Amino acid sequence: MTDALKRLSDEGVAIWLDDLSRTRITSGNLAELIDQSHVVGVTTNPSIFQKAISQGHGYDQQLTDLATRKVTVDEAIRMITTADVRDAADILRPVFDATGGQDGRVSIEVDPRLAHHTEATIAEAKQLAWLVDRPNTLIKIPATKAGLPAITEVIGKGISVNVTLIFSLERYREVMDAYLAGLEKAKAAGLDLSKIHSVASFFVSRVDTEIDKRLDAIGGDAAKAAKGKSALANARLAYEAYEEVFAGARWAALDKAQANKQRPLWASTGVKDPDLKDTLYVDELVAPNTVNTMPEATLDAVADHGEISGNTVAGSYDQARADLEAIKELGVGYDDVVQLLEDEGVEKFEAAWIDLLNSTEAELKRLAPSEG
């Protein structure tokens, strides 16, 4: 069942699970996925935690203790989520050790309501790193304009970062620049660059969802022929940019100081369109030194019928440019699409955070001991 996952791993793609819950940790499921399905990392986001906390009773004991202490709902959420991330990081520690710190990592996101506030994002990232207190943690910072200087500052302090919500090629280059600037700051401060890691989470499926919706509205054979191609084209050109930046003179100086490349991470790889193959964004984004973070349904689909046939990114760049040019000629504005997706991405995470606050508050009230 896991031959395709092994082939994917052998091709240099790190398989990370895009999900976490207390039950997944305590039941042994996460350890099983690491052992049997080649999972070497975990990513989380506000939506994942909202779903985990609102379902079942896995958090009742901790919520009861927090309610007894009369903590604020914000503090309760941080205590709950960092506990899960800490426990998952401990389960993944052998992978972290075996890979020299490259994998075996668990991501936790700054409060998305801070996405447009640089200094608050920096402070939150430092606090999360302190709270989790595990070397195999990645702090997730959204790739907004305000997030870019925060990335540089946090990396410069030696904290490893997962840059999330990247949709555009231009913004991706800005993210890589922010990472390199952070490494340069860390180097100037005398920090050990070999201990600092980062991934850049380039979102995939949402690009097709938005562009294909616009192509449907345009109609015609040319628009129909262009569907289902933009997300892969966008991601492949991102990998081309990665190859270019991490072969340049600026990187060479950092490479001599034992710095780590910021790996591209393919995020949002669950296929939304039922007309597309459910393993499309895994099969067609195979390239060395990348990460693919998958919801469990996608992980299972790849294990069952994924078609891993070697590097599917090398040699694809000219076709990728042609595919993006085709949608522009049809009247779909690339810049408009990617900015909309970034704005919506922040809004969705903010909404999930509000839902998380509301559901956690309700649980604290339900489990609070009666006065007397």
Image (cartoon, rainbow, N blue to C red):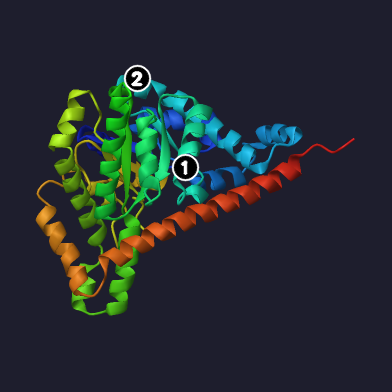
Vertical order, 271 against 260 (above or below): below
Res 180 quadrant in image: top left
The residue lying furthest to the right in this view is 372
In front: label 1 or label 2: 1
Packing grade of label 1 (10 A; few <14, some 14-19, many >=20) is some
Q: Is residue 274 visible?
A: no
Task: Provide residue 148's location: percent of width, then percent of height.
Answer: 35, 45
For the residues bearing labels 1 and 2, Cβ distance under 8 angstroms: no
Q: Secondary structure at mark 2?
A: helix
Disc 2 marks which residue? Answer: 97
Residue located at (12% from left, 58% from top): 319
User: Closer to the camera, 117 or 133?
Assistant: 117
- Residue 104 at x, y percent in the picture: 37, 28
**Direction from residue 30 to residue 36 in the image, left or right:** left
For disc 2, the neighbor class at 10 Å (few under 14, some 14 to 19, many from 20) is few
- Viewport quadrant of the N terminus: top left
Q: Which amino acid, mark 2?
A: Asp
Give the residue drawn at x 64%, y 51%. Answer: 358
Q: Quadrant of the C terminus?
A: top right
Q: CA distance from mark 1 to mark 2?
A: 32 Å
Which residue is tagged 1? Answer: 119
Name the amino acid, label 1.
Glu
